[in-house]
Amino acid sequence: MYCPFCRHPDSRVIDSRVAEDGTAIRRRRSCPECGRRFTTQESVILMVAKRSGVTEPFARDKIVRGVQRACQGRPVDEDHLAMLAQRVEETIRARGLAEVPSHEVGLAILGPLRDLDEVAYLRFASVYRGFESLDDFEKEITALRRSRCPAGPEDDADPAGIPEKGD
């Protein structure tokens, strides 16, 4: 580690602490040459393997931009998008892999996005899963409805929630 002040190629660690919920380490260092102190932060870089074979560092802002397009015109604010991106990153980091396929990132987005806004979820899923027909949309909408309210014997009422005559 080069000293940022005198460019001496060595430094001594004075103190180390866990930072950012355990995903990074902050180290207080001292330069033996000039005696000045500075702080460094070490974190593991999560890499994403794209279909083309290229790998790139994971970027939350890339998730926000992708989901933002699906949320265009929907009542979703920037804070919700930032929280969604954080949830996606936490999910991926919890797997404990240094490199994840981009497909897994897309899968990690689908769950939180479905909870955030169902229309945005359908838009994102249609592109991500490559919907090619109305049947694809219908199947996804049916799955959404089932996940929202599982069918049971009490669901014999009219879809508007009005009980049929004689109930």
Image (tube, rainbow, N blue to C red):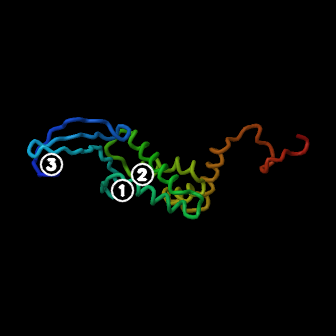
Q: Position of residue 151 (x, y in %)?
A: 70, 41
Which label's residue is closer to the chain start, 1 or 2? Answer: 1
Instruction: Write down the residue under mark 3.
Output: 3
Nearer to me, 67 or 167: 67
Relative horizontal placement of residue 70, taking residue 53 as reference (left or right): right
Front of the two marks 2 and 3 = 3
Q: What element does badge 1 sit on?
A: loop
* N-term mark: 3 or 1: 3
How crowded pointer 2 is (Cα within 10 Å; few <14, some 14-19, many 20+) is rated as some
**Tag 2 residue:** 103
Q: CA distance from mark 2 to mark 3?
A: 40 Å
Residue 25 image point, x, y percent = 29, 39
Q: Position of residue 99 (x, y in %)?
A: 32, 46
**Residue nearest the observer in this picture, 116 or 95:** 116
Identified at 77% across, 38% down, the residue is 154
Secondary structure of the residue carrying numbered label 3:
loop
Q: Residue at x 12, y 43 (%)?
A: 35
Left or right of residue 163, residue 111 in this image? left
- Contact? badges 1 and 2 (CB < 8 Å): yes
Name the amino acid type tagged 3.
Answer: Cys
Q: Are marks 2 and 3 in contact (CB under 8 Å)?
A: no
